[in-house]
Image (cartoon, rainbow, N blue to C red):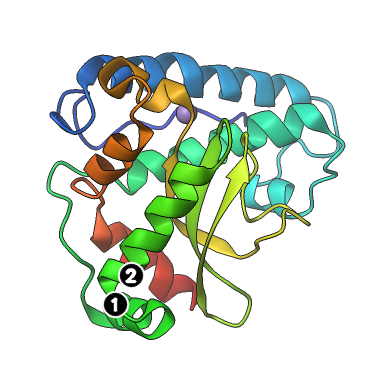
């Protein structure tokens, strides 16, 4: 059983004007598909074949660059599509809303911290909201296709929200204006999905 490109729950133009249809289509059908093809080739015939992506990444040999880059690329984009929705935006309520207030003081403080982590990630990478091993919320960023499931990346935990800050995620619409893309992302965050991930892991 090889890894497959997930279907999106919305059309490519559904996130406009925040994320444009052309970017979504190329990102999903070309970039994400390429990570999946390369990941399948990298695990085929090895002891990793048949394992879940969570298990592969959590126990990863970080020197295995093919699995690190493409397994990360597969997992990270699955999360990215899932945490966005044309009906997104606003603020989380319930347990997650409360936990954000406790961890960061307020939703606005969290937004500032997350946006800063995303804006200041040098070059390509991701910013994350994670649940750490003690059940606490943390924000951090990682380079390239690394993520917080991988051993020793410097910030750890189960990612419940992630933003792709590779230029391919925003350049057609925003060019060099990464902060504008990050700000726009907040209008499409599917807090229901993020909350479900939080409740599963806290
Ligand atoms: Mn990407």
Residue topped by disc 1:
106
Instruction: Where is residue 182? Give x, y as percent.
Output: 32, 42
The structure residue drawn at horizontal position 21% and vertical position 22%, both measured from the top left corner, is 20
Left of 45 or right of it: where is 135? left
Q: Do the residues labelled 2 and 1 touch (CB within 8 Å)?
A: yes
Residue 202, compared with residue 142, is above or below; it is below
- Is label 2's Cβ within 8 Å of ligand 1? no
The structure residue drawn at horizontal position 84% and vertical position 34%, both measured from the top left corner, is 64
Left of 104 or right of it: where is 145? right
Q: Say few, some or many: other residues with alpha carbon within 10 Å of mark 2 (under 14 / 14 to 19 / 20 or more).
A: some
**Number of the label disc, if any, that sits on residue 189:** none
Q: Say few, some or many: other residues with alpha carbon within 10 Å of mark 1 (under 14 / 14 to 19 / 20 or more).
A: some
Residue 110, compared with residue 85, is above or below; it is below
Secondary structure of the residue carrying numbered label 2: helix
Residue topped by disc 2:
109
Of the 4 image quadrants, the one containing the N terminus is top right
Please tell me in which quadrant of the rendered image residue 193 appears: bottom left
The structure residue drawn at horizontal position 43% and vertical position 80%, both measured from the top left corner, is 103
The structure residue drawn at horizontal position 35% and vertical position 76%, both measured from the top left corner, is 100
Instruction: Where is residue 36? Give x, y as percent.
Output: 58, 24
């Amino acid at each position: 059983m090889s890894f497959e490109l997930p279907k999106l729950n919305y059309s490519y133009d559904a996130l406009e004007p925040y994320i444009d249809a052309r970017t979504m289509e190329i990102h999903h059908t070309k970039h994400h598909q390429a990570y999946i093809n390369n990941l399948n080739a990298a695990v085929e015939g090895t002891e990793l074949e048949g394992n879940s992506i969570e298990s592969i990444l959590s126990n990863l040999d970080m020197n295995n660059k093919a699995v690190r880059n493409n397994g990360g690329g597969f997992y990270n984009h699955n999360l990215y599509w899932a945490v966005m929705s044309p009906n997104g935006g606003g603020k989380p309520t319930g347990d997650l809303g409360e936990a954000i207030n406790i961890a960061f003081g307020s939703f606005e403080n969290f937004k500032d911290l997350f946006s800063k982590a995303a804006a200041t990630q040098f070059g390509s990478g991701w910013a994350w909201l994670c649940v750490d091993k003690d059940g606490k919320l943390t924000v951090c960023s990682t380079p390239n296709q690394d993520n917080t499931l991988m051993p020793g990346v410097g910030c750890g935990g189960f990612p419940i929200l992630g933003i792709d800050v590779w230029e391919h995620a925003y350049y057609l619409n925003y060019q060099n204006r990464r902060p504008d893309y990050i700000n726009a992302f907040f209008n499409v965050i599917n807090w229901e999905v993020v909350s479900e991930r939080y409740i599963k892991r806290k």
